Image: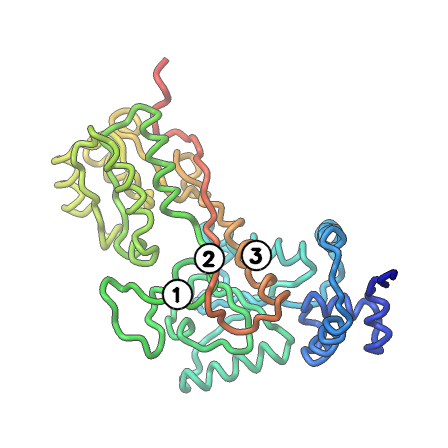
Amino acid sequence: MKVQKVSLENIAKLAGVHKATVSRSLRNHPTIPKETRDRIQQIAKELGYRPNPLVSMFQSQARASRPERMQATLAWFNDYPDEACWRDFPWLRGYLDGARTRCEEMGYRLQQINVTRSGKSFEQDMGHLVSQLTGQGIYGMVLPLVLDGQFLQYRWDNCVIALIGGGHRHLPTGVEELPNRFYPQRFPSADRDLFYNARLAYQNLLRLGYHKIGFVYSTYLDDEADGRARSGYLVERSAQPDHGGIPVLMLNRFKEGRPVEFDAWFHQYSPDAILCVNPIVRSWVEDLGFSVPGDVGLANLNIVEDVNEWSGISENHEAVGAAAVDLILSALSRNEIGLPPQPRKILVPGKWLTGTTLKGLPE
């Protein structure tokens, strides 16, 4: 007996809609009302429809290479007082550029939503924000490095959220304080693979002949990143027998002059190279009478425009922004609105860049 293949045309005829509506409904495209999507998906299920994976792959590639007219919008959440910060600061701009490019590739538009507190209750402000989103047909939003932790405690029942960075360190509502600020994960997130990046930088310093490698880092950044960069450094140092016993130097401030803790640490342990993230460390070394890279090598764990002459790690911010959008579109395609029970995390590894702050390999 010949089994007749169920086509999009069959489903469209039974549903009384155009074939394109069926296609978008089966992909959970947010431009199709949820009630229509559910009805069409039920008809497809009853008919036993199964998509051809090769055709689906080809269609996805075609949509990416020839973006269709903008049909839906994702939001970029901004609660910073300066609305232009995502354009003005190079370590932030990459996230936004990567997210916007990925949206355009997939036929979406990325709209920045600037949020300010009205002075009313948080719930009232959130009600206004949610109404604004749903009124514009926005069902997906990127939360990039938000300032107000209350936004990370909200339910977000009617939206797909993807986080950039480690917002999970904010305590969710109803969860008791846990030791060392270790809190449950709530959001899908895309982030830099700081653990890998620190190990990659350390390995490159070893390759260049450095052995007494120090690590100078911000306590705030370490807290925000759950100690991942520090952990990567410590893993590599523990495997290096001649590391000189240099302890990690964590500092609370970098802008108020050279701290005495740095002077004491530097003179006691005499590192031949330092891994850091703040470029002010170079001035501190030179103020102590040492040259870079002649006396001390420096490697920056976040190479951006203002330190592009340094050796170190490019964190690939554009790829992180794109990955956040991928998480949202993937959830929308499965009609998974709200926070998932098992949030997914994408970690994007950085790459090593050779600059002028380290000596080259000996001839």
Q: Position of residue 252 (x, y in %)?
A: 23, 55
> Mark 3 = which residue?
99
Mark 1 or 3 closer to N-term? 3
| Outermost front residue | 1
Identified by mark 3, the residue type is Ala
In depth, the one of 348 and 14 nearer the eye is: 14
> Mark 2 = which residue?
345
In depth, the one of 291 and 174 nearer the eye is: 174
> Mark 1 = which residue?
185
Q: Position of residue 64 (x, y in %)?
A: 70, 52
Which residue corresponds to the image point at 30% horizontal and 23% vertical from the top-left? 209
Q: Position of residue 193 (x, y in %)?
A: 42, 48
Asked if the residues shown at circle 1 and circle 2 are in contact, with their CB atoms under 8 angstroms apart, the answer is yes
The N terminus, quarter of image: bottom right
Tell me the element at label 2: strand
Mark 1 or 2 closer to N-term? 1
Tell me the element at label 3: helix
CA gap, disc 2 to disc 3?
Answer: 16 Å
Which residue corresponds to the image point at 15% horizontal and 34% vertical from the top-left? 269
User: So how many labels did they put on this image?
Assistant: 3
Residue 156 horizontal side relative to residue 245, left or right: right
How dense is the environment of label 3, judged by Cα within 10 Å: few (below 14), some, or many (20 and up)?
Answer: many
The correct choice, above or below, for 203 with respect to 64 in the image is above
In the rendered structure, find residue 103 and report the number of the disc placed on it: none
Identified by mark 2, the residue type is Lys
